Image (cartoon, grey):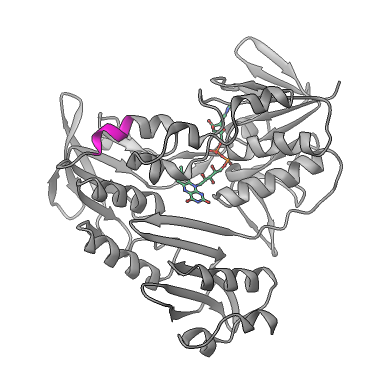
Amino acid sequence: MTHIAVIGAGQAGASLVAKLRNSGFEGDITLIGAEDALPYQRPPLSKAYLLGEMQLERLFLRPESFYAEHNITLRLGTRVDAIDPQRQDIIIGDEVIAYDQLALTTGSKPRHLPASVGGDLKGVHVVRDLRDVDEMAPEVRQGARALIVGGGYIGLEAAAVCAKRGVAVTLVEMSDRILQRVAAPETSAYFRALHSDNGVDIREGVGLDHLQGDAGRVQRAVLSDGSTLEVDFVVVGVGITPACDLAEAAGLAIDNGIRTDELGRTSDPLIWAAGDCASFPYKGQRIRLESVPNAIDQAEIVAQNMLGAAKTYVATPWFWSDQYDVKLQIAGLNSGYDTVVTRRGEGAATSFWYYIGEQLVAVDAMNDPRAYMVAKRLIEAGKTADKTVVANPEADLKPLLKA
Ligand SMILES: Cc1cc2nc3c(=O)[nH]c(=O)nc-3n(C[C@H](O)[C@H](O)[C@H](O)COP(=O)(O)OP(=O)(O)OC[C@H]3O[C@@H](n4cnc5c(N)ncnc54)[C@H](O)[C@@H]3O)c2cc1C
C-alpha cells in the first residue's frame, strides 16, 4: 500500500491529509506532530482564546474521530528527528518509518530573546503554541504590568488583549513605527491611535536593551533610551523564522523557507512542502506567506499534486487581525507600493488602498468589509480601481467590479 507521510500537524498538515482522502487517495496516511494537541487554529491564541472567551475544543480544526473515521494515523507529541530522502525514511528516535511520498508542513518558529538579555527569565513569553498561551494566560490579569516587545500583528493583538483585561501595557517597537514591515504609515497611525485610546503606552524607535530579574523571574526592563520599567511579564513578538531544520539537514534546497516549485514540490521529487515553512514562485518573485488562508490553499493544492494533478498554486494573499472592536482585513501584497489612497466609510470604517502607479495591489480595511470585498475581488482579477472613486466616500464601489 502506498504510504504518504506528513510532518507537522498544524493548519497545513491537517488540511493536506483531509484533502488527500477527499481526493480519493486510499493508501496509508500518517500525520506526525510535535505538539500534544489535536491540530488546531492559531489565530485565536492572540485573540479570543487569550482573552478567555474561547474554549479549547473550538480551537481544534477537526474532532479526534475525524482522523480515525478517515483512516489517518495521527502521531501527536512526536517530534521527527530527521528525514533520509535517499532511503525514503523518517527517523523518530530509534524508530524508522518508510514513506513513498512526504509532505513537510512544519510551520515556523518564534524568535526568542537571547538569554544574554534576560530572555530565559520566567515571565517572558512568546505567542506561538497553545502551550505558550496557556502558560501566559494566568499572568494577564487586572493590575499587572506588561511589556510587549515588537509592534507587529502578534504584539499588537497581545497588547489589545492585555489592555482589555486591565493590564498596564507598554509596547516598544525598535523601528520608527509599529507595523513598519507590513503596512503603510497610514495603517500604523490608525493602530497607534487605537491603542493609545485604550491606554497602551506605545514607544516607537525604542528597543529593549535587557531584562533584569529576581530569583529567576523578570522584574524590570531597561530600554534602549536608558529608561527603565517595572514589569510583571513580557510578551516577545519579534517575528518568526520558517521551520526548515529537517529539510536543510536532509539537503533540500532552502530559499527563505523550503524552496518549492509552483506545484509545491521541493528539490526532492518525492518531498513536498506547504504553509509557513514553504517558499514558492509568485508573479515573478519568490515569496513565503504566514497566514491561515495560504496554509489551507497551498496544502490542498499539494495534496492533489501528490496524487498527480499537476495544479499550479496561485496564491491569493489575504489576512486579518482583530484588535479591540476593530477587524482589520488585508488583501493583496503591498510590496513596492508608491501611493496610498484613503477611503472613509460609514461610521468608523476606513480603508487604505495601495497602488503601484495606477495598479491597485493591496488594501487594509478597518471595520469595512464592503471595501475589503471589492478590493479583494479587483486584486484577484488583476483589475484596478480609479483613485478618485476610491477616495470619494460618496462613490459606490460596486460598479468598479463591472469595469
Ligand atoms: C498567535 C498567532 C496569531 C495568528 N493570527 C493569524 C490571523 O489572524 N490570520 C492569519 O491568517 N494567520 C494568523 N496566524 C498565522 C497562522 O496561524 C499560520 O500562518 C498558520 O498556522 C500556518 O500553518 P502551518 O501548518 O504552516 O504551521 P503551523 O500551524 O505552525 O503547524 C506546524 C506544526 O508543525 C510542527 N512541527 C514542526 N517541526 C516538527 C517536527 N520536526 N516533527 C513534528 N512536528 C513538527 C509544529 O509543532 C506545529 O504544530 C497567527 C499565528 C499565530 C502564532
Residue at position x 26%, y 53% from top?
172
On whether residue 47 falls in the magenta region, the answer is: no
Residue at position x 60%, y 68% from top?
376
Residue 110, position as x, y percentages in the image: 44, 40
Q: Is residue 264 visible?
A: no
On whether residue 138 falls in the magenta region, the answer is: yes
Q: Tell me where residue 20 sits by quadrant.
A: top right
Q: Tell me where residue 342 sits by quadrant.
A: bottom left
Against 250, residue 328 (above or below) is below
Q: Tell me where residue 205 sits by quadrant.
A: bottom left
How many marks overall? 0
Q: Residue furthest bottom?
A: 388
Residue 358, position as x, y percentages in the image: 59, 84
**Lateral position of residue 258 relative to residue 266, left or right:** left
Residue 186, position as x, y percentages in the image: 38, 73
Q: Which residues are magenta?
A: 135-140
Residue at position x 50%, y 76% from top?
353
**Lateral position of residue 211 relative to residue 135, left or right:** left
Against 68, residue 230 (above or below) is below
**Lateral position of residue 200 relative to residue 258, left or right:** left
Residue 39, position as x, y percentages in the image: 56, 32
Against 45, residue 343 (above or below) is below
Q: Nearer the viewer, residue 154 or 71?
A: 71
Q: Is residue 35 visible?
A: yes
Q: Nearer the viewer, residue 215 or 366?
A: 366
